[in-house]
Each structure stands twice: as structure tokens, then as C-alpha cells.
């Protein structure tokens, strides 16, 4: 008999997201040639989310496998990419992360190895590559910037925190998490990493929680649901003011036989 166990590790890193309100969602099942088919015959699936009249998100998955790409678009056909873009490795780790502005690469893009280690950074403006930094240079600059930020922190500065800390988080998971039926049937397990925003009221808007590391569609969606429906966090404090905080949270989905 299989017993379900879930382990969540409280850890957080800075990141970003786009705040909108989800309105519509559609799931399309596809065969090896990208043609729509019934679920039982599908090799892939595409999740299409409409946030408003000017923003759609397209998430492409292997069936019973990790996400392949996630891209936001300003049109319903997905022709004008606008917003966050992520390509994933075959193991569900990020391969590249960046942003598009009206179809052109913009800002800083991060590229990773198959094991998830940062490989290099590239900076684009209006689709033109301006500079590239290898991982050693990028890490040195990030460490230097962190040292400066740490030196400017006051004793009252705090990061966003889940009520009750690690114990409170595990209690929330045990009460809330539902292991998806299809993941149990297909013996799918793994670690999802969710990037999310905690706003100044301590809430996690549903559309500000997104998949940094993927396992499969149903498990990813359950992780997003958990984060979006979590109780209010204690917001981050900076120089006596409440501020938005960007974090990453790993959630381990595990099936154990007994």
C-alpha cells in the first residue's frame, strides 16, 4: 500500500513576477505532431490562461512529465510575446529565464546548466544583446551587491515569514495539500519550486505564484494552489516600512510504500 508523505523546506530567494487577475483557463491535449487529441492519446498538453484582454500565459508540458516552456503574450494567439519567459530542461529545472517586451528580448536573461547551476547572464535592449557575463563574474557582482545591502540593513529589517515558521508551514501543508490522483496512479514524485510574491498585506496573489522547477502539470498546479491559498504571511520590513518580498519555496511530493 502506498502512503503519501510531503516535505516542505522553508527557503526563499529574491525573484520577480507579474501581478494580474486570472479570468479563464483552457487545457489542450496534443499528440506528437502538435495536433489536438483526446487526453488518453496525448503526448503533451498546453495550459492557456487569460489574465485580461491584453495578457495570456501559455504553459507547455510533457504529459505526466515536467513543463517545457512558459511564455506570456499580449495577444490571444500567442504571437506577440510580452512578459516572463521560461524554458525548462528535460528534468524540469530552469534552462533560461527572461522577459520579452512586445516580442523582443529585454532586460537581464539567466541561463543555466542541466543541474540548475547559473551558466551566464545576458542583457538585452529592444532585442539587441548588450553584454554577457559568465557565472564567476555574475556571482562576484551578486555577492558584492549583497554585502552592500547587508551593511545597510537596520535591526528592524525582516524578510517575509510564514506564520508559525517551519512548524506552521508543515501544519498548513498537512491540512491543505491534496496529492493529485493522476500523480499517485502514475507514481509521480519530485520537488516543485514555486517563486512567489508576498505583498504588503502579507497575501500571495494567485497570479504572482509561478513554477521555477517543475514536476508535472497536476503537481505543479497543486503547488501553485497551496501558495496562492496560504494564510497571510508577515510582510517584509525595510527601514520601518512594509514592502513587497519575492521568494522561492520548495515543496517535496513523495510517495512511500509500506
Image (cartoon, grey):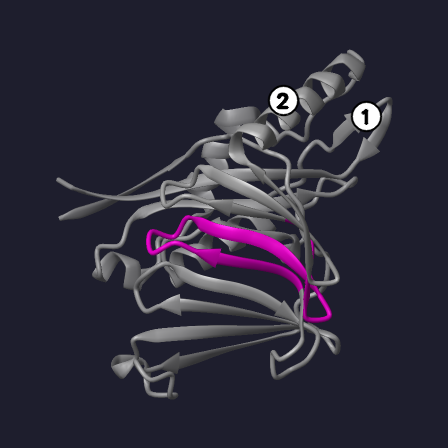
Residue 195 screen position, x and y as percent = 57, 45
Which residue carries the number 1 mark?
238
Give the image quarter of residue 51.
bottom right
Please tell me whether mark 1 sits on a helix, a strand or a loop.
Answer: strand
Whichever of labels 2 and 1 marks the residue nearer the N terminus, that label is: 2
Residue 108 position, x and y percent, is 66, 48
Instruction: Report whether residue 143 is seen.
Output: yes
Residue 143's label in the rendered image is 2
Would you call the spot at circle 2 few (<14 residues within 10 Å), some (14-19), or many (20 or more)? few
Q: Is residue 61 above or below residue 116?
A: below
Residue name at image x 81 percent, y 25 percent: 238
Residue 6 sits inside the magenta stretch: no
99 in the magenta segment: yes
Q: Majority secondary structure of the magenta segment?
A: strand
| Res 161 label | none
Q: Are marks 2 and 1 in contact (CB under 8 Å)?
A: no
Write down the quadrant of residue 146 in the picture: top right
Quadrant including the C terminus: top left
Query: What span is colored magenta in the figure?
Result: 83-108
Which structural element holds mark 2?
helix
Q: Could you tell me how far apart the alpha carbons at marks 2 and 1 are, in whole angstroms?
A: 20 Å
Q: Position of residue 30 (x, y in %)?
A: 36, 81
Residue 229 seen in this snapshot: no
Amino acid at each position: 500500500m502506498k502512503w503519501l508523505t510531503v516535505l516542505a523546506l522553508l527557503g526563499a530567494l529574491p525573484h520577480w513576477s507579474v501581478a494580474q487577475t486570472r479570468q479563464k483557463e483552457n487545457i489542450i491535449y496534443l499528440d506528437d505532431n502538435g495536433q489536438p487529441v483526446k487526453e488518453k492519446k496525448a503526448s503533451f498538453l498546453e495550459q492557456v490562461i487569460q489574465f485580461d484582454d491584453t495578457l495570456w500565459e501559455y504553459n507547455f508540458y510533457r504529459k505526466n512529465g515536467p513543463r517545457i516552456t512558459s511564455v506570456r503574450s499580449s495577444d490571444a494567439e500567442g504571437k506577440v510575446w510580452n512578459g516572463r519567459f521560461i524554458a525548462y530542461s528535460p528534468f524540469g529545472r530552469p534552462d533560461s529565464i527572461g522577459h520579452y517586451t512586445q516580442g523582443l528580448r529585454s532586460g537581464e536573461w539567466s541561463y543555466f546548466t542541466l543541474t540548475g547551476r547559473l551558466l551566464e547572464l545576458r542583457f538585452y535592449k529592444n532585442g539587441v544583446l548588450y553584454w554577457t557575463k559568465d557565472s564567476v563574474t555574475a556571482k562576484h557582482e551578486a555577492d558584492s551587491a549583497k554585502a552592500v545591502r547587508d551593511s545597510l540593513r537596520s535591526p528592524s529589517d525582516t524578510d517575509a515569514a510564514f506564520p508559525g515558521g517551519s512548524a506552521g508551514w508543515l501544519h498548513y501543508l498537512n491540512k491543505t495539500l491534496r496529492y493529485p490522483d493522476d500523480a499517485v496512479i502514475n507514481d509521480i514524485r519530485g520537488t516543485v519550486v514555486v517563486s512567489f510574491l508576498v505583498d504588503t498585506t502579507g497575501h500571495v496573489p494567485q497570479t504572482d505564484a509561478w513554477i521555477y522547477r517543475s514536476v508535472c502539470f497536476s503537481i505543479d498546479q497543486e503547488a501553485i494552489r497551496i501558495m496562492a491559498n496560504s494564510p497571510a504571511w508577515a510582510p517584509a520590513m525595510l527601514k520601518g516600512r512594509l514592502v513587497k518580498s519575492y521568494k522561492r519555496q520548495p515543496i517535496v511530493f513523495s510517495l512511500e510504500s509500506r
